[in-house]
Amino acid sequence: MSTEDKEQIENDTSGMVGNDKWLEAYKDPVASLYTLTQCICLSDVQADGDWKLIIADLGTGSFNMKLKVYKGTNLMSEHTIIDLPTGVVSFYMDTHEPRTPAIAVASGPYIYVYKNLRPYFKFTLPTLEVNPVEADLWNQVKEEKINIFVLREMLEGMRAEGTVLTVRSLRFLQLQDVGDCETFANMYKYTPLKRQTVITCLSTMKKSMAEEDAISCLVLGTESKSIYVLDPEAFTVLTTLDLPAVPVFLSVTGLFDVEYRIVVACRNGCIYTLKRGTTDPLKNCIELNSQPVGLERINKTIYVGTMDESLHCYTSKGKKLWTVKLPGSMTTMEVIDYKSKGFKAVIVALNNCQVHIYKEKYLVNVIKTDAIVTGLKFGQFGREEGTLIMTLKGGGLVIKILKRNATFEEKDLSGGPPSAQNTRLNVPKKTKLFVDQTMRERENAITMHRTFQRDLYLLRLNTLREYAKSLDNSMNPISSDPSEPLKLNAQVQGIGPTFKLTVNLQNTSLSQPSTSLLITFLYDEKLYNFKKSFIEVPMLVPGLNYAFETFLECLSDKGVSDNIKVFVLKDGKSVPIITGVISMPVSEGLVVV
């Protein structure tokens, strides 16, 4: 997008910057919260109706990672996390009263579950199969059959061939000093070799009921290109789904025990849709032009933000509906689901310190911030439903509340075609009769084609026969004799019982006149009486139209009519040159005044 386009969008949106729709409830630019959208959630962790803000703080990226719980603007609880967190969700794991949700934090290969703000359970991902060649190499080192130089050479060869190695082997290959390599090998050669994956994304899925406080399963994506669905009570793997690439974003709908759909955005720039019983994820695949930055789902539409400054919308079957060009690079995105007003939209954070809200493809609101937004979460916070949580790149925290009288107009303030152009046509559904007819056509396609061809040939044959017959009998208003090129036209005037019949003749040749022509009529003498049934035609000059008139009287008062044939004859020939058929109108009765 050019600089002029960005300036135009900024000018168009300058009058709708969202301060008139949002109340700034809290702002702390030095809150020291370094987190992402996936590591923020809102939950009623104490079942008292006062929803808390739960944030997994990334810290410096290597230490000082903590799980922080805020009540209002005050820090209520804080727990240390060993590894870098990749996701935080709130879910119900049992039916005990009071209905207190648990908090699940994904960190490295573990999921830490907190209940009543206390550590409750730690789930470890299943270990993966170790390459037998790699395991044999470390066994030989343990038995001192090979030295560290041979080990290093063999491991480097395996890595070059694309073999997935364990963390121990990769750490060993990073060491440069010979003494460090020997110390490392002697320290870990007696430890069993394991290959452990890590969690990349985390979400939840209702198990058997769709209520808000129903028991939910944990859905997690791993670096080993797999999706695991965990039982919330026993924390066992219910099902495993394999993917062609590493998942980074998840959107889950449905019930695990009934029917579910998992939409996954992967690092290879593709989006896969997984359903119950899915064996081939490539069947429902959407290929993006750029890497995904965010993935959300509203009803049956999928919203994807990409690194090429675009927001795309697809149907659940993978058909692209529209694409919106953004005025900056996207950093994160979130769904606004304001149930009390029935408002659903997508909120997008950009690197130009703006947050855009899109209802379908229309930009309805813009929020300006002091720094780039890295984390977004919309929902109930405290006792207020429409709360927007924003974390900034410098560690700041901003909390905004949607005004109760705020309305979002569904129109594109950045210009473009009218909204009526995007209204879907009301196409009727396929009826059972249509489906049955389609199946019959598929099953009898060859027979139907042969029947059609046969009927077409018969139609052509009968048409040619009638045409030849009309030529032989001169039953054509245009002469087919090149020596007498004539054209006949007849008109009937009057309502009866007396009619005026006008016969128009025209010589269509370029230079040859027509002579010795006669006009006569064939009619039912019991029904009609002609005043002059035989007309002598003078010489016809080429190109001129000649009119010949006569009167006839209908002899019947019963409301019947018949056809009258007009013959143009040539002196000395028994076959007419032209024949015309006149369909007489029904005669009106004689009115006596």
Image (cartoon, helix red, strand yellow):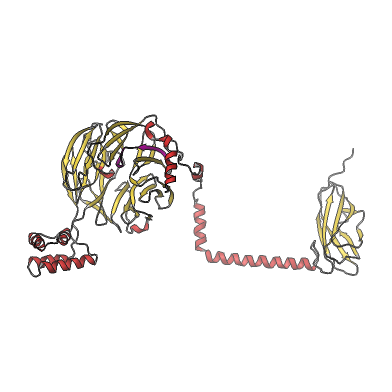
Q: Is residue 185 left or right of residue 252?
A: left
Q: Check the picture and name the quadrant holding the C terminus.
A: top right
Quarter residue 547 falls in: bottom right
Q: Residue furthest front?
A: 3
Tally the marks: 0
Q: Position of residue 94 (x, y in %)?
A: 22, 41
Q: Which image quadrant for residue 55?
A: top left
In the displayed structure, 36 sits above or below 488; it is above
From the viewer's side, name the closer residue of 588 and 365. Answer: 365
Chief SS of the magenta region: strand
In this rendering, the answer to whether 286 lies above or below 346 is below
Residue sitting at 45 percent across and 39 percent down? Answer: 413
What is the span of residues highlighted in magenta in the rendered image?
A: 363-377
Q: Position of residue 213 (x, y in %)?
A: 27, 38
Residue 454 vs residue 351: left or right?
A: right
Give the left or right position of residue 25, taking residue 327 as reference.
Answer: left
Counting from the top left corner in percent of width and height, residue 174 is at 16, 60
Please identify the quarter of the rendering in which residue 447 is found. bottom right
**Residue 261 is at least partly visible in this image:** no
Whether 366 is among the magenta residues is yes
Name of the residue lying farthest toward the top: 405
Q: Please say whether residue 368 is visible from this viewpoint.
A: yes
Q: Is residue 296 left or right of residue 171?
A: right
Task: Identify whether 72 is placed above or below 375.
Answer: above
Residue 591, above or below 529: above
Q: Nearer the viewer, residue 218 or 352?
A: 352
Residue 103 in magenta stretch: no
The residue at the point 12 percent across, 68 percent down is 149
Q: Position of residue 170 (x, y in %)?
A: 17, 60
Residue in view at x 40 percent, y 53 percent? 318
